Image (cartoon, rainbow, N blue to C red):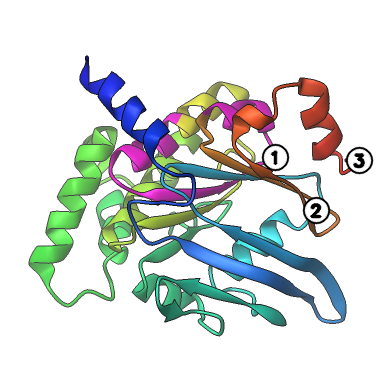
Amino acid sequence: MSADADADADAAARPADQETMESIVVEDAVTGYENSEILHGVSMRSRDGVTCIFGPNGSGKSTLIKALGGKLPLWSGSKRRGDRDLTNANASDMVDSGIITVPQDGGLFPTMSVKENLLLGGYTVDDKQTVQGRIDEALAAFPVLEDFLSAQAKSLSGGQQMMLSFARAMVSGADIFLLDEPSAGLAPSLVDDVMEQVQTLVDNGKQVVLVEQNVKAALPTADHVYILAQGSTQYDGPPSGLAEEDELIELYLGLG
């Protein structure tokens, strides 16, 4: 049996609730903005591979990713990783716990060089050797960037800028990545490239929570799917459970 077949067999044999690294888990999350409640008791957790969160505009996808990443406080409910309670953790606390958010625009410093952006990924790390080792790892994952180390980030293509955002996040040492619509604003020809970059993160041992509006592009990467509508969970299960396209559309539009 081939190595790939062995890996597939191992994945199939592993119980759905058993993971090879500690996941981020949120239970009964209620939050929103000012006096507007957006999430109404949403529960979810990351899985090994890619956990996709789909939903129409206004469904609460981005609100959920902000709550997961500590950028938006929970009004009620809980958040944890393993035995560590992260309910009241801010974004900095989340990075310390190995969980990092990559925003929709990538969050790069456009006039700084690619190398400088990568170095900023390790700004909380005192050991320069550790930072350089992580940069080497990131460049091994995304070797195209090696040709642009001295170039300004703004000179890269849209797909390359997202690649740099992923690489910089790797330098932080995080092993759970929260991605907020990384394909937004990109030319259709680049969307598949970004999804390949997402798979590169997984291949490098990362868990990915992916919020995406482009369901057709993201669904093939998914190992588990949540569908939100009107701040509530409409679907929680494997992508294989969405066997009928009509069912996906119904759930995606919040009609289920």
The numbered mark at residue 59 is 2
Q: Position of residue 238 (x, y in %)?
A: 59, 36
- Disc 3 residue type? Leu
Q: Position of residue 30 (x, y in %)?
A: 74, 74
Judge by depth and name the residue closer to the eye, 159 or 141: 141
| Category of crowding for the residue at label 1, using alpha-carbon neighbours closer than 10 angstroms: few (below 14), some (14–19), many (at least 20) | many
Q: Position of residue 156 (x, y in %)?
A: 41, 38
Q: Is residue 26 above or below residue 141?
A: below
Point out the stretch of residues depicted in magenta: 196-220
Judge by depth and name the residue closer to the eye, 196 or 164: 196
Question: Quarter of the image containing the C terminus?
Answer: top right
The residue depicted at 51 percent of the width and 80 percent of the height is 90
Q: Is residue 255 above or below residue 132?
A: above
- Lateral position of residue 175 relative to residue 87, left or right: left
| Category of crowding for the residue at label 2, using alpha-carbon neighbours closer than 10 angstroms: few (below 14), some (14–19), many (at least 20) | many
Q: What is the quadrant of residue 237 in the picture?
A: top right
Indicate the secondary structure of the residue bearing disc 1: loop
The residue wearing badge 3 is 255
Indicate the secondary structure of the residue bearing disc 2: loop
- Disc 1 residue type? Gln
The residue depicted at 64 percent of the width and 75 percent of the height is 72
- Tell me which numbered mark, 3 or 1, is placed earlier along the sequence: 1
The residue depicted at 56 percent of the width and 81 percent of the height is 87
Q: Position of residue 181 (x, y in %)?
A: 61, 46
- Lateral position of residue 219 relative to residue 194, left or right: right
Residue 111 visible here: no
Judge by depth and name the residue closer to the eye, 163 or 111: 163
The numbered mark at residue 213 is 1
Between marks 1 and 2 in the image, the one whose residue lies nearer the viewer: 2
- Disc 2 residue type? Ser
